[in-house]
Image (spheres, rainbow, N blue to C red):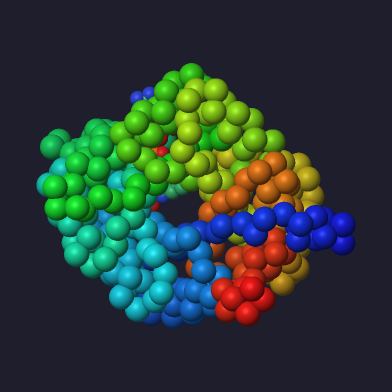
């Protein structure tokens, strides 16, 4: 990032951010997650979310992580929840337990076949059939008792592998909004125009909820290629070139990753984008440096400066 662009970023409004974590599988990963949470907490994100897996034990880890975030931190947690392998009754039980634990924001997803991406999604008998049904079901969860979840959904600026076409995708996104979604968080992408074109299409289709760019902070380019292959996300040539020769140099890869993310956000901020969702991979340093490059300071520092 040039001195000019840093100056521009200071002139732009301070962005709103949210952070995504995944539930830890063992003690070492757990320590890493909670250290990451503590370091990111002062950035005062709008919310932090925790992903949801397909199997029973990984789901338990999500529930435990989200509840601990609610109980032990000042953060606002959001729990990812899918339609996979669960009856409506199961989903309602999970939602109710979250509500009781003070978790009032759900990221509602269809999810993938438990046999892996690439296999067609088949609804569970007695379960929610689609992301739209799930959003509607969560909205209908005891509003009589004043329990109204905030609901985020997913969207795909480069289209999802199951996409039937742009018109169908836009109709689905609008249906999620009409079912009660408050915002849509995007799959990751690396070209700002990819998001800006998507935003234009969505606006033309009547989507008015905020679209929040999902920014990937994966410094392991081999790992990034694998994930991008699975979800059919485009990795531009310039990105391949940036990581070339850094295979054995994790420190430089981190610096490159934070700079790429900050440039991407910075460009979109110049086009009026105010919200960014960071896929942190449970690492604080990349999210912190990206936020810092965007002019976002820890809440304490902001309060002192005010
Ligand atoms: P949908 O958007 O409902 O459907 C996926 C796509 O299929 C649509 O975008 C559209 O192209 C096509 N499609 C589906 N139904 C229709 C229809 N009726 N008409 C037209 N087109 C249709 N997965 C997890 O397992 N756990 C997680 O925690 C998780 N978190 C995620 C967070 C974000 C921000 C994102 C972007 C993805 C996440 N995923 C997660 C991955 C997600 O579960 C998969 O991408 C899944 O295949 C689709 O779920 P969805 O809710 O986006 O589905």
Identify the residue shown where x is 26% and y is 66%. Answer: 102
Q: Position of residue 75 (x, y in %)?
A: 42, 69
**Image label count:** 0
106 shown above or below 295: above
Residue 237 located left or right of residue 14: right
**Can residue 231 be spotted in the picture?**
no
**Residue farthest toward the front in the current orientation of the protein:** 306
29 shown above or below 180: below
Identify the residue shown where x is 50% and y is 74%. Answer: 41
Identify the residue shown where x is 72% and y is 54%. Answer: 12
Quadrant where the N terminus lies? bottom right
131 shown above or below 101: above
Foreground residue, 245 or 196?
196
Q: Quadrant of residue 283?
A: bottom right
Residue 259 located left or right of residue 81: right
Q: Position of residue 11 (x, y in %)?
A: 76, 57
Q: Position of residue 285 (x, y in %)?
A: 62, 72
Foreground residue, 244 or 138?
138
Q: Quadrant of residue 14?
A: bottom right
Foreground residue, 128 or 204?
204
Residue 80 located left or right of residue 99: right
Quadrant where the C terminus lies? bottom right
Identify the residue shown where x is 54% and y is 62%. Answer: 280
**Can residue 56 be spotted in the picture?**
yes
Q: Position of residue 141 (x, y in %)?
A: 18, 46
């Amino acid at each position: 990032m040039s001195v000019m662009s840093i100056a521009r970023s200071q002139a732009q409004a301070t962005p709103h951010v949210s952070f995504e974590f995944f539930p830890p599988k063992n003690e070492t990963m757990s320590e890493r997650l909670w250290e990451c949470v503590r370091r990111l907490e002062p950035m005062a994100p709008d919310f932090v979310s925790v992903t949801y897996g397909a199997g029973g034990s990984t789901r338990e880890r999500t529930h435990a992580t989200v509840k601990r975030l609610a109980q032990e931190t000042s953060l606002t947690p959001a729990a990812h929840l899918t339609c996979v392998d669960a009856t409506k009754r199961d989903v309602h039980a999970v939602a109710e337990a979250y509500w009781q634990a003070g978790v009032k924001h759900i990221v509602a997803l269809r999810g993938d076949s438990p046999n892996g991406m690439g296999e067609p999604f088949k609804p569970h008998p007695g379960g929610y059939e689609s992301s739209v049904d799930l959003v509607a079901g969560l909205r209908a969860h005891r509003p009589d008792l004043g329990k109204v979840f905030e609901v985020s959904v997913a969207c795909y600026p480069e289209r999802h592998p199951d996409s039937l076409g742009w018109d169908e995708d836009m109709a689905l996104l609008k249906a999620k909004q009409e079912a009660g979604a408050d915002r849509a968080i995007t799959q990751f992408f690396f070209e700002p125009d990819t998001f800006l074109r998507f935003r234009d299409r969505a606006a033309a289709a009547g989507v008015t909820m905020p679209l929040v760019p999902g920014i990937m902070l994966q410094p392991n380019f081999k790992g990034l290629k694998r994930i991008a292959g699975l979800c059919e996300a485009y990795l531009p040539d310039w990105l391949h070139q940036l990581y070339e020769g850094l295979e054995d140099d994790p420190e430089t890869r981190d610096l490159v990753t934070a700079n790429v993310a900050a440039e991407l956000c910075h460009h979109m901020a110049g086009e009026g984008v105010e919200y960014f969702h960071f896929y942190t991979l449970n690492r604080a340093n990349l999210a912190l440096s990206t936020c810092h490059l965007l002019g976002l300071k820890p809440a304490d520092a902001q309060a002192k400066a005010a």
